[in-house]
Image (spheres, grey):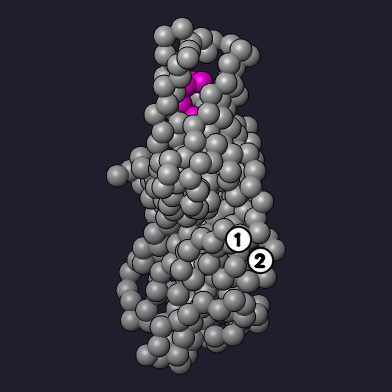
Amino acid sequence: MRKRILWFMAGVAMACSGGEDDFVSSESGREMPLLKPEIEAMDGVLPASLAAGDLFGIYVACGDAGSEPVLQASGNYRDNAPVMYNEGSLSWDEEIYFPLNGGDMAVYAYAPYIEAVENSLEVPFAVEVDQYPEGAYEASDFLWAKELVPQDGTGETALQFSHRMSRVVLVLTPGEGVDLSGGMDVRLSGIRRECRINLQTGSVHVPVEAQETEIFPRSEDGMTYEVVLPPQYVPAAVRFVKLTTATKSWSWVTPSGGCTLRAGETLTFNLTLTDD
């Protein structure tokens, strides 16, 4: 499996409460080791290349000696710190040191960065409605990582990012007499694009009150379409895929058991378009 490797230095700390004043250098505290993030490919599809200025959000929680740190809704050691990618690295503005009580630390990271987050256990996120324009598909993905960093650890600590959204691929095959040369309108319906993400666990929840909408996938060749969606269950008898040319239209309806979109997985539909 190919992986895109990023590097950033993170420091360590003296106190476990949140606040800028806690982020002070101290030779009496142990500095956090080098973290080595890796972003997994999702079913063979690499995430978009990072560019200078891209932001990750970072949370740091710390615990007492002998207890594992647990991310809180707010008031953590570090809350939603924007960390910028530049020249192959991500780095803190301040050095960070382990607490002097001997406790370990836990790092929670995500992308893309969201400036207004009131509750780290209910982070609001929504995929783009139209994912065809440049960057819209990549902006609809959500990457998440969690890693315990022990006081007695040495060297590097891996920070493994995973995809928390789901991916749907439509592979179209024109049957006899079907002409797609004039282009086609493709959309998915019955989808809720808004969700909430728990940064402690990486779990994704789609609120029942979220409105259903149509989502437009991207395509490079007009025959294979792909779209990123929040993980969710699509009930039976939903007109899930709609395809329209200037002269004809088709649709695919979910089967009796519905279909389930799962985080980090791709669901592929091979659709043959007939002239019936």
Residue occupying the far left of the picture = 1
Q: Please give the range of residues in magenta.
A: 221-227
Question: Circle 1 — which element?
Answer: loop
Q: CA distance from mark 2 to mark 1?
A: 17 Å
- Tag in front: 2 or 1: 1
Q: Identify residue for label 1.
A: 207
x, y percentage for residue 167?
46, 43
Camera-side residue: 31 or 212?
Answer: 212
Q: Identify residue for label 2.
A: 117
Relative to 21, 262 lies left or right: left
Q: Is residue 222 magenta?
A: yes
x, y percentage for residue 14?
53, 86
Q: Is residue 182 visible?
A: yes
Tell me what residue is drawn at x 47 percent, y 64 percent: 202
Question: Circle 2 — which element?
Answer: loop
Camera-side residue: 76 or 182?
Answer: 182
Q: Earlier in the sequence, mark 2 or mark 1?
A: 2
Instruction: Check disc 2 and give the amino acid type.
Output: Val
Q: Are marks 2 and 1 in contact (CB under 8 Å)?
A: no
* 3, above or below 162, in the image: above
* 231, above or below 157, in the image: above
Q: Is residue 88 visible?
A: no
x, y percentage for residue 159?
40, 62
| Figure disc tally | 2
The N terminus lies in quadrant: top left
